[in-house]
Image (tube, rainbow, N blue to C red):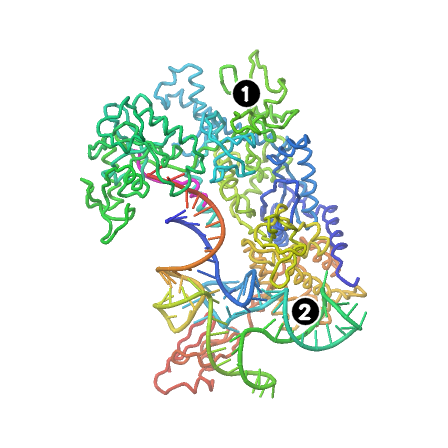
RNA sequence: GCGGGCGUAGCCGAAUUGGCAUAGGCGCCGGACUUAGGCUCCGGUGGGCGCAAGCCCGAUGUGGGUUCGAGUCCCACCGCCCGCACCA
């Protein structure tokens, strides 16, 4: 064999691993399970199997986690390293709309491609644990968890979820209902409605994001800031609709607090905190003039209430029309009316205008403020002043109470509005001298604020809240940006929601043993709404046969829920199922859950930062519910999270902006040419649409899986995005070829390993390398680990034979990154296959240390000499070496001199 | 605007605690082997002087600060990336 033949060797070892079940991880209680070993759970964010297959940018995180998993196997851990597929979702369904092919068929075809590609790069998954969210044996448990959410309520007193039965028992024991009526006085329907109002999964009529093109409503999280669908970039409209909701807001505080102990990137923690958006403040009730009714506002600055010169409600605010006067009251300025003859007309017109205006426009910053006076005056509770109530779309209905007290002196938005509508501005916080801005939002003492004058912001807040509480006008409250999770979708390819609707609208959950509720077959996948923006939402399952849609129980006819779950559902708990994928009596066996999820849950979770908020927040929420109900043993699912960076690649566009195949573009004299025409280079993620993808199939055929793995790790830090540079691949190819030649005689295939011990220099390098690579492995610094192995390999060049101690350690260090070539060499070194469970090499701390180190000698502040000294030299010796140096002596003045020895770990000041 | 992060050679990048800045790779230059070629081998690669050992000088976005000593810590500024954004 003249060269290292990657095709032959990689196929050989992949076949070996599969036929020997090398990476199968037994569960507690299974044959071969060793309970004395520590466990590590290494998880990738499982993919949605798209029809395009993988390109080389996709597996970079998988390779990183695979190296981590392989390293821990060699360290003697029981390693859970599974893979599966998040296979419900829109693309397969949209493909079905076009082709009529059942989503199950396309999904299975795509999964087969993914598995072939993943296997071809030597990832050490335990494929026996493979799961698919679309498998009835899987979604049975997704539905089961939904039923637990339906059957639970959040007990705010203990801050955790409890079974509904507990709530019923408490009501029967005298717990007051929210409406204040005693439980015993309620009839069955009223009781049911009280209970339904407490469930973690509940139905509510809310304003939803309706996307006709996708034929479904979307969660806020799935709508871009331009008011379009994240998937497909279709227009989204606001519609009121009765929908399933999950009460994630109940967990807002715990979702924030529990972030602290997680070993997650700070940026992701920050994004989650930001998304939940907790702010402390006060709700304050402002009496409506001439009425007993109040407008309740939320503010984070109750201390500024003396400066509240007007109020604003959102256009969607449910202010009762009867409170709006028939004519413009005295004190109405012309600028406030919008030219309308009566308040109701002005309000109706403004509401209509807002509804027409897209979300995009509404959310655009720096848009000129619009609004209209409602004809209602309120009373400022502290000043007694008469202040107008406006309607304006800069106040959002979804946050706080949908109403604000406006303090233009201390808030930039309010200032802008006040200027436009000629409303009075009163400063209530003293700006620093020389402040010439408009609204002042900084620290300062209260002014123009009656009994608050002179107080700082914090103290003023405390005093005013006490004052309001004493008068029943307000209280301290906390507000969140986080909304409850809209959980219904009108699409076909998702988990059916296991609920029945009774003749009187009552909800009836399926029992656990009626699960799974199978997805029915339908004739047509095309949503009725698809081409009509004005169409109403219709659930796809209304196309199901009547036998499925109707259920008769005890003579009562029930209708099945026709909505399905969103794609996030399956990925909310898949990490639990991997611990015990075959269990058909529980979602996960207790022993398996406690063992694999023990201590920190998933020990390393690797995936893209695009899931920083949605998937990771939803999964944490479900996990906490399951934790509260006693189904899992840890409060958090993912102890350590790592976001791999993306592989970027140049893409090229011609003069019409059309992408041209990147591999056919040539660089000549600083100009990029495609078929002789100049094209423009752009950077970005790899993707089929940009015609710059490289598939693992072609790469593995040309260079091999080991080169792909090592190259992707060597490109740079795993968590930063970096460009794919085909030119650089050759360095890794050379490394592996050179390595092979160091070990194997090219012509005879003889093993070039000697029994002679390594010389001191090589041995020191070896032990330094082991130390560095070992540190790199746990820190996921694989780029530097590769560089260390390059360096060690370079030291072997020119040796006739590699000393065995070096060879053995080298192969073992190489194994996680380049497992095929490492297994081959390991076998040739005379070991049983495979190196996957060979012990990781240990280093000798003495040998790993540098043997000499440079001592820098400064005389009176200037470096005068650098002297190589042995590591571990004593202070006295170092001093005598330094003072013995002629160069140093030449600069001694005879006066007391300051001589400083600089030595790693030793600062030694000598005065002479 | 708020939050998170980053600026090191021609390019990708390294530098555990503040301690020889620039490891490793690409590219480039020179040489060897070869009829030829390069997924071969050897050497060089911040600038200057030197045949050489070596010597001198400069440099981690900019400007300050702390320190015997700063890529690393502190302050200000400049530039870039990511997330959120009329959230009261």
Checking the image for residue A345, the label placed there is none
- Residue A899 or A572: which is nearer the viewer? A572
Residue drawn at x 56%, y 54% is: A718
Tag 1 residue: A500
Residue drawn at x 33%, y 25% is: A345
Chain under callout 1:
A
Tag 2 residue: A796
Tell me if residue A621 can be seen.
yes
- Place of residue B52 in the rendered image (x, y in percent of width and height, measured from the top left): 60, 84
Residue drawn at x 62%, y 32% is: A93
Task: Count up the numbered dots.
Answer: 2
Q: Nearer the viewer, mark 2 or mark 1?
A: 1
Mark 2 or 1 closer to N-term? Answer: 1
| Residue at the outermost left position | A450
- Place of residue A203 in the rendered image (x, y in percent of width and height, measured from the top left): 47, 25
Label 2 sits on a secondary structure element that is helix
In this view, A3 is above or below A618: below
Tell me if residue A77 can be seen.
no
- Place of residue A756 in the rendered image (x, y in percent of width and height, measured from the top left): 71, 71
Q: Is residue A251 left or right of residue A307?
A: right
A852 in magenta: no
Range drawn in magenta = A271-283
> Label 1: how many residues lie within 10 Å, few (<14), some (14-19) or many (20+)?
many
| Quadrant, the C terminus of chain A | bottom left
| Quadrant, the N terminus of chain A | bottom right
- Place of residue A682 in the rendered image (x, y in percent of width and height, measured from the top left): 57, 53
| Residue at the outermost right position | A748
In this view, A534 is above or below A897: above
How far is the residue under mark 2 from the one under mark 1?
72 Å
Using the rendered view, name the quadrant where residue A89 is placed.
top right
């Amino acid at each position: 064999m003249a060269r290292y033949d990657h095709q032959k060797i990689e196929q050989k070892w992949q076949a070996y691993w599969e036929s020997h079940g090398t990476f199968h991880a037994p569960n507690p209680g299974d044959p071969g399970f060793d309970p004395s070993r520590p466990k590590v759970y290494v998880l990738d964010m499982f993919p949605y199997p798209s029809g395009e297959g993988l390109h080389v940018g996709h597996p970079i995180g998988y390779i990183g986690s695979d190296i981590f998993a392989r390293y821990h196997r060699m360290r003697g851990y029981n390693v859970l390293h599974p893979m599966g597929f998040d296979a419900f979702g829109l693309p397969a369904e949209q493909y079905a709309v076009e082709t009529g092919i059942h989503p199950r068929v396309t999904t299975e075809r795509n999964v087969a491609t993914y598995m072939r590609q993943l296997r071809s790069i030597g990832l050490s998954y335990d494929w026996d644990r493979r799961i698919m969210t679309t498998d009835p044996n899987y979604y049975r448990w997704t539905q089961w968890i939904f039923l637990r959410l339906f059957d639970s309520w959040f007990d705010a007193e203990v801050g955790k979820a409890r079974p509904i039965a507990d709530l019923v028992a408490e009501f029967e024991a005298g717990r007051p209902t929210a409406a204040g009526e005693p439980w015993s006085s309620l009839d069955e329907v009223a009781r049911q409605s009280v209970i339904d109002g407490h469930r973690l999964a509940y139905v509510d009529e809310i304003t939803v994001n309706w996307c006709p093109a996708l034929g479904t409503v979307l969660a806020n999280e799935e709508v871009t800031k331009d008011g379009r669908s994240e998937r497909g970039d279709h227009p989204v409209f606001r519609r009121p609709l009765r929908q399933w909701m999950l009460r994630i807001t109940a967990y807002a505080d715990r979702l924030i607090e529990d972030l602290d102990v997680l070993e997650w990137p700070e940026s992701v923690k920050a994004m989650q905190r930001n998304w939940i958006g907790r702010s402390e403040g006060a709700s304050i009730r402002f009496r409506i003039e001439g009425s007993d009714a109040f407008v309740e506002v939320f503010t984070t600055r109750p201390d500024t209430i003396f400066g509240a010169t007007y109020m604003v409600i959102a256009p969607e605010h449910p202010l009762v029309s009867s409170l709006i006067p028939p004519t413009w009251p005295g004190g109405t300025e012309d600028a406030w009316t919008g030219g309308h003859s009566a308040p109701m007309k002005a309000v109706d017109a403004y509401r209509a205008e807002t509804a027409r205006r897209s979300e995009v426009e509404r959310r655009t910053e720096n848009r000129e403020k619009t609004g209209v006076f409602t004809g209602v005056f309120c009373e400022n509770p502290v000043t007694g002043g008469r202040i107008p109530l406006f309607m304006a779309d800069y106040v959002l209905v979804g946050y706080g109470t949908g109403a604000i007290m406006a303090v233009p002196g201390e808030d930039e938005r309010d200032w802008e509005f006040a200027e436009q509508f000629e409303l009075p501005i009163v400063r209530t916080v003293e700006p620093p001298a020389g402040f010439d801005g408009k609204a002042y939002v900084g620290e300062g003492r209260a002014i123009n604020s009656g009994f608050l004058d002179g107080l700082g912001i914090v103290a003023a807040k405390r005093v005013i809240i006490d004052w309001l509480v004493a008068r029943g006008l307000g209280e301290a409250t906390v507000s969140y940006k986080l909304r409850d999770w809209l959980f219904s979708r009108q699409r076909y390819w998702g988990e059916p929601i296991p609920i029945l609707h009774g003749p009187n609208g009552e909800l009836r959950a399926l029992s656990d043993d009626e699960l799974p509720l199978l997805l029915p077959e339908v004739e047509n996948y095309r949503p009725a709404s698809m081409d009509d923006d004005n169409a109403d939402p219709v659930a796809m399952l209304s196309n199901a046969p009547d036998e499925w849609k109707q259920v008769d129980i005890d003579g009562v006819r029930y209708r099945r829920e026709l909505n399905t779950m969103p794609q996030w559902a399956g990925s909310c708990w898949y990490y639990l199922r991997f611990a015990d994928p075959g269990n058909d009596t529980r979602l996960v066996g207790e022993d398996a859950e406690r063992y694999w999820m023990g201590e920190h849950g998933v020990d390393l979770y690797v995936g893209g930062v695009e899931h920083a908020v949605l998937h990771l927040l939803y999964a944490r929420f479900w996990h906490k519910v399951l934790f509260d109900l006693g189904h899992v043993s840890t409060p958090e699912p993912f102890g350590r999270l790592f976001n791999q960076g993306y592989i970027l690649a140049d893409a090229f566009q011609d003069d019409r902006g059309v992408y041209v195949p990147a591999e056919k573009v040539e660089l000549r004299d600083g100009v990029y040419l495609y078929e002789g025409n100049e094209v423009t280079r752009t950077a970005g993620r790899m993707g089929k649409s940009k015609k710059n993808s490289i598939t693992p199939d072609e790469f593995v055929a040309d260079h091999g899986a080991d080169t792909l793995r090592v190259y992707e790790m060597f490109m740079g830090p795993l968590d930063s995005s970096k460009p794919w540079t085909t030119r650089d691949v050759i360095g890794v190819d050379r490394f592996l070829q050179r390595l092979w030649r160091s070990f194997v005689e090219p012509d005879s295939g003889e093993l070039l390993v000697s029994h002679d011990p390594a010389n001191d220099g090589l041995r020191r390098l070896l032990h330094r390398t082991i130390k560095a690579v070992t540190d790199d492995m746990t820190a996921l610094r694989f780029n530097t680990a590769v560089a260390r192995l390059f360096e060690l390999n370079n030291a072997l060049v020119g040796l006739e034979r590699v000393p065995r101690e070096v060879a053995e350690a080298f192969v073992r260090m190489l194994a996680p990154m380049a497992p095929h070539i490492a297994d081959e060499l390991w076998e040739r070194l005379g070991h049983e296959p495979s190196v996957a469970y060979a012990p990781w090499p240990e280093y000798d701390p003495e040998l790993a240390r540098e043997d000499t180190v440079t001592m820098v000698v400064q005389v009176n502040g200037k470096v005068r000499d650098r002297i190589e000294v042995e590591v571990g030299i004593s202070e006295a010796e170092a001093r005598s070496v330094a003072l013995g140096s002629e160069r140093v002596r030449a600069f001694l003045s005879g006066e007391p001199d300051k001589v400083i020895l600089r030595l790693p770990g030793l600062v030694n000041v000598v005065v002479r």
